[in-house]
Amino acid sequence: MQVFLQTIVGGVSLGAVYALVALGFSLVYRTMGLVNFAHGNVVTVGAYLASTFYLSTKLPFALAMIIAIVVTGAIGLVIERVLRPLENKDFDLMLIGTIGFGIVLDALIIMIWGATGRAVPSPVPTAPIDIFGLRIRTYDLVVLAIAALATVLLVLFLSRTKRGTAMQAVAMDHEAATAVGIHVGRSNATAFMIGAGLAALAGGLVGPLLYVSPALGGALGIKGFAAAILGGFGSIPGAILGGLAIGILDSFTAGHFQGYSELVTFLVFTVIIMVRPTGIFGERTVNRA
Amino acid sequence: MRPTLAVLAVVLAVAAGCSAPGSGKEESGNDSGPIKIAVVDAQSGQLSSLGAWELKGARLAVDEWNAAGGVNGRQIQLDVFDDQGDPTIGTNLARKIDSEGYIAMIGTAESAVTIAMSPLLKQAEIPNITSGQSPGLVATKSDFLFLNGPTSTTYDETLAKHIVDQQGIKSIAMITNNGGYGKGEHDAFLKALTSRNVTPVADQVVTADQKDFSAVLTSIRQKNPKVIFLGAEEVESGLIVKQARDLGITSAFAGAAPQGTPVFLDTAGAKNAEGTIVSSPYLSNDIDEASKKFAAAYKAKFNEEAELHGAKAYDGTQILLTALKTSNVATGKPLADAIRATKHDGLLGDFAFDETGVGIFSTSIGIIKGGKLVAAES
Amino acid sequence: MKRLLVVAALGVAAWFLPYGLDSYAIHVVNVILIFAILAIGLGLVMGIAGQVNLSQVAFFGVGAYATAILTTHSGMGFWVAGVLAILATVLMGLVIGTPALRVQSHYLGIVTLGLALAFTNWVTNASLSGGAEGISGITAPTLPGVDLSSEYIYYYLELIVFAVVLGFGLFVVRTALGRRMRAMRDDALAAGALGAEVPMLRMTAFMLASVYGGVAGVLYAGLIRYVAPESFNIANMFLLLAMVIIGGRQSLIGCVVGAVSLALVRELLVDHPTIAQLAYGSVVVLVVVFAPTGLAGLPRRFRAYLDHRRGTRGTAAQLRPFQPYEPEAVSRSTQDQLLRVEGVTKQFRGLKALDDVSLTVSTGEIRGIVGPNGSGKTTLFNVISGLYKPTSGRVIFRGADMTGRAPYRLARAGMARTFQNLRLFGDLTVEENLLVALDRWSTLSAWRYALRPLSVLRRDRALRRSAAEVLERYGLTEFASLAPKSLPYGIQRRVEIARAVAADPALLLLDEPAAGLNGEEVRQLAEIVRSIRDSGRTVIIIEHNMGLVMSLCEQITVLAGGRVIASGTPAEVAVEPAVIEAYLGDSMNTDDLPVPSAGEATR
């Protein structure tokens, strides 16, 4: 029982990070129908930026995170601008274009920060909480709280602000939104910027949990993408649920199948997607007519 | 139409002139010009830190020799090739250094790459001094392959001797990854334990890029072992230690070379890594006069603290250069024989190669105390 | 002739290439050839069939690993092991292709990527595959009298295999199977409605890709004689993808060019892999944005640019008049029911698009279906042609219950349709559009490609003759080799009708065929539809142009709010009070012609 619960706790803490990554995927997808395969690399950039400001310039962790989010958001804008000619044209080409961006970002990361990584000390150095032998790290709680806060803020932004509702409109009906005078390009750019910002948030938060290296984002990106699809691509609650689900699934397969855990995780994922292609909260049909 | 035919005729004529393709091969190792030695290692990718350390160790040795006039009055030319940690690229490079006339090779730091290259180097008769430590290297049975350090078997045998025989600890758990290094450690340490009639209380395998170890660690916590053996690279071992301490595991950790590195210490956090038992042939830079001298030269040249991998590559390169000198710059089989015959008093100990290409059979036990690796008292 | 010469020159150059290379260079060339074979496979599945496949590198791995395991563990000879390895890869191809039956595009991307990762994970763990250290000492291939352990000789083996698989790939692309795959890539829905078995085609595409992966894997095992998990990782998958994209995914030659040039650039930058990575990543982005057809598409774009500069405005092709069909001698008084729709209801999440709709269409009839916008007309077509499965009710076609059958099955049973928004295959020529419809071959008979290639060629020639007849009849001969997208809207409409009739249907469904046509074109349309009916086919037509409907149709069914509110002859229907009420606000005259929006007209 204790193993079971502790496994869930471990899964949830990484699951919260997957959820943030998935959120970025979903936000960009619902707004502009683009799957950003470079998202994982943007996570890495965010992690490096946050840790650089935190470690080298000794800024407070929160401040370092904010700077990282802003800079990464700018990178998001660049990607969107370059790929804009392809929007609403060829889906697969755009997808490949983002893979290209991922390759470029990966190379740039290695050029700037080197191929080896760095360890980031936890900004919350208190001892874990012990509840009947169940140990919960304080930093995990911080991560969960920030992820929850980010989700709430995002939902508020989408439903309460003018820019946010405009983005919702674009997500629902691209052409109708254009017809009522919504600037679709700006809406897409905002989505991409927020998506990149969320990636930086995920990367910055995960830094002290793991180890910041060029390979960091690849694994997080694939798992985050899987999470977004599992939850229902384009759905905000789906991204959160999918993230937690992948985190817990990962944690359990690691415990039960040891070295084969990845094989099992992806097989389970494939089967779920084949049984229910729209995911948990999916509203869009996959084979669009 | 007509020009095409003409081209065809010319090509045919040229072709008729030579019997079969592949006759021209640049032969080096003759009497003039610099002696060409290749360093093949990952200079990019995740394992590039190992590659960078190795290159520095080799460079230091070569520069010392060159400053002293080289070998037989000839300078040594050290060129680096990047295998990116990929065995396929490794095999490409094996052919490349062969066709470009390198007479010996230093590297690689990853056993899988070296194993892939080994048959080609054997065929090309290029002696290779590797930093790998997998028993699989020995299994390739190549006369041209030499190890610049002990194999996993030695590391783990020493470790088991210290933990089981000397400390009398029998309650031991194992966490290893499924990568090349982890697999070798798993087999070697398990063998060492089995020979002592000790069964590990837990034998957990993780993947090489796993991030969350709560399931594995929680089940180990319930067994409450005295010592947890780690068979994984620096970063992953560090993460495991960090998460274990967060889960309230107080057991000591034990492992081989990666657990003695600064990367491991940084990732785990010095406090969490306290008391880790390390089996290493090169515990620190101030074990004796030779290591102090090496560390000082290393620091002066690269402005960086020397560590195990640099020391291993330094020793390996010294052996190669000594063999070149004693064999009067031989190549191929005679050079390999000269290396085998070389007795070297190096930083890691006294090298004396056996048939399998292993030259050193002992490691020392160190303990991490106050964020530093120090020799164990026993 | 000129092309033949170029091929011959390239062949001779390739044959004598080894004479100029040292032992390292020949190794590099050998590796490049293997990547080129892989790229052809990826080009077939991604570029030709449009299936996002990020597991090509896993096929490669299965081929290499199977060869390694069979030669080292089971002691088989290289050739036997190689054949078995390719079979194993095909099996893997079928497994990885299965998700394509359910999901597409990025979903398929992540699933195939996940399965590729699962494969690497398996070989890293299993003791059978030697774990992370891989398998060394793979038996070298032997041939009596030839020393294949020499890389120079091995090059010739690879060269021959490469030529064969490239030739086979081109053969597939340019004949029936490839045409059908390209049609499916451009528009899976329309391809299905023309009888292309989409699920079968997708599996075939994955199978083809896996064969190429397997062949490359076997050659790799024979060349390197060592396999390890790192060689089949995601970075190599993305590299392969970059090769195909840069070269031009829709052209197999382009894939080869991409593979060769990228591999050469990487070789040049071998000491600076990060710079190489930066370079090819940037090139991928640039190609995607500025030259989606890759290097292979550049000559055509350049020519188009020159034409544009010179001011030569396209071709002077002209639409010729339609030549009516010979009227069918059989009288159409047979009154037997061709189609019966019984109480069909279609529910979309709270919205009832169709509510208990029933209608019967007799053989030889021209039936009109009219109704205000949103009355469920197109939904009814979609149910009849199998695109939608009705919530309840039955569709009986030619006496058999066809409710909810896949569109391609209905198409094969003798039903064809056009679409409101025109669904021509954009990257196929007009002639190829027709060929796809004319081709009634089951995809299962694709085995002929391997065993009886000549029969495939013969059949293709026969198909082209039929296509020429259809082109002639519809006055489209001069447009045969043009892309449909470049044609005026009215001509595109005619091409779509010609395509639907080319499928030789008993029942033809036309969804707003007059939308966007001018008066003269509408008149021609009426003539064409009548002639089609006279040739013995039954037609159901959805139309807003009431003048056309009234003059053309013998029977009219009126839908409103998803229900049938009236049916009968045009005269009967026109005076029905319910109809007049439904059309209140919509004037019932011939000018009631919905103006297509700009977006619709160009699509």
Image (spheres, grey):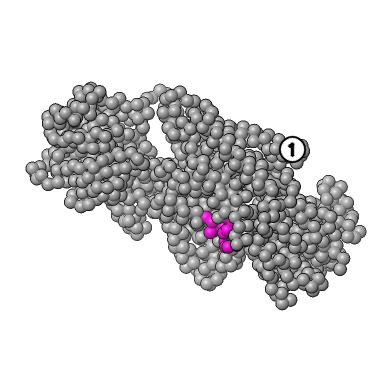
Task: Give the chain letter at badge 1.
Answer: A
Horizontal and vertical percent position of residue B141: 68, 70
* The C terminus of chain C lies in quadrant: top left
Q: Along the line of sight, which residue is nearer the eye, A55 or C220?
A: A55
Q: Residue at x 77, y 68 (%)?
A: B159
Q: Using the rendered image of the protein, determine whether residue B143 is visible from the camera's viewpoint.
A: no
Q: Observer-nearest residue: C23 or A182?
A: A182
* Left-right relation of B325 to C372: right
Q: Mark 1 points at which residue?
A: A60
Classed neighbour count for the residue bearing mark 1: other residues with Cα under 10 Å, few (<14), some (14–19), many (≥20): few
Image quarter of residue C541:
top left
Circle 1: element type: loop
C82 shown above or below A57: below
Can residue A74 be spotted in the picture? yes
Corner quadrant of residue A161: top right
- Rendered residue at 85%/49% (across/down): B299
* Residue A262 sits inside the magenta stretch: yes
Q: In this view, does C328 lie to the left or right of A235?
A: left
Which residues make up the magenta segment?
A250-266
C191 lies left or right of B223: left
Q: Main secondary structure of the magenta part?
A: helix
Q: Quadrant of the N terminus of chain C?
A: top left
Residue at image coords 53%, 30%: A160
Q: Type of residue at label 1?
A: Pro
- Image location (x, y in percent) of residue C429: 34, 38
Q: Position of residue C409 (x, y in %)?
A: 28, 50
In this orientation, which residue lies closer to the viewer: A245 or A224? A245
